[in-house]
Image: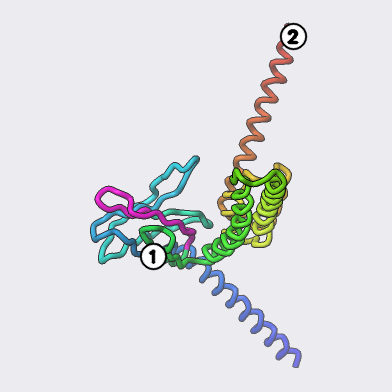
Amino acid sequence: MTIMRHTTAIIIALAALIATSCSNSNSNNAAAEGYTVSGTAEGTVDGDTVFLCKIEGFFDVVPLDTTVVANSKFTFKGTTEGASLRFVIPMHNGQAVAFSVFVLENADITLAVTANGRNDKVTGGPSQKLYEEFLDGETQLGQQMQMALDVLNDSTADESTRMMATLQADSVSRQQHTFRKEFIISHMPSPASDMLYGLYSNEFTDEEQQELLDLMGQKQPQYPVYKAAMAERSKRGRTGSAEADSAAAEGIQQRKQ
């Protein structure tokens, strides 16, 4: 009986090890396979160019990849780290005919790009779904903010009404701030949480940034925005130390003189 119990325990342990190994292998294979972005774009014909882009600084469009429409479809393939907002810009006769945004990650992604941009359809990976959930909350708060702004921009509104609108706008602004921070925290660990921190970190105080980075370090240190933020902080720390050393050396030299 003792031998049978030991044998059973070994079999269970081996089964668990094999299951874990298969799971990790599948996960690694999915990441290694990268992304495939395929879709259609209104206003294009076979032979037209489609750009895959990112935005830097103040709406500077940076092309990352190009492809050509074939059989009325376009396709991008590659690998990426984490999740990031990307844009496709289809061209026709040298002119951009649309501008569509989606979340790029290692997944199968399909886009149906429309000329007006309001009816675009995106089917993506887990980060796309989380981003759409985030946008739903942003939209609700944005509508409340717009109502307050409409009153503030109404020259016929009396002083009391405008005061109430100002208080409403301030309240909604605080709600937006809290919503963004809590969404980032509540969806750790995930590439989408990392991406959203990168998009909104400048809106947080230094203390909030430190709080979020501490949590990210505990829960999702593998993602690119966190790693870039920590590298930048480390660089600033080294620069600060070097400046302090230089100032100290200069002070010593002055005292010697």
Direction from residue 35 to residue 136 in the image, left or right:
right
The secondary element bearing badge 2 is classed as: helix
Q: Which residue is mark 1?
A: 112
Q: Position of residue 24 (x, y in %)?
A: 56, 69
Magenta residues span 89-106
Image quadrant for the C terminus?
top right
Q: Position of residue 249 (x, y in %)?
A: 70, 18
Q: Is residue 229 visible?
A: no
Amino acid carrying label 2: it is Lys
Q: Which residue is mark 2?
A: 256
Q: Residue visible at 72% across and 46% down?
A: 160
Contact (CB < 8 A) between labels 1 and 2?
A: no
Image quadrant for the N terminus?
bottom right
**Residue 207 has which mark?**
none
The secondary element bearing badge 1 is classed as: strand
Give the tally of numbered discs: 2
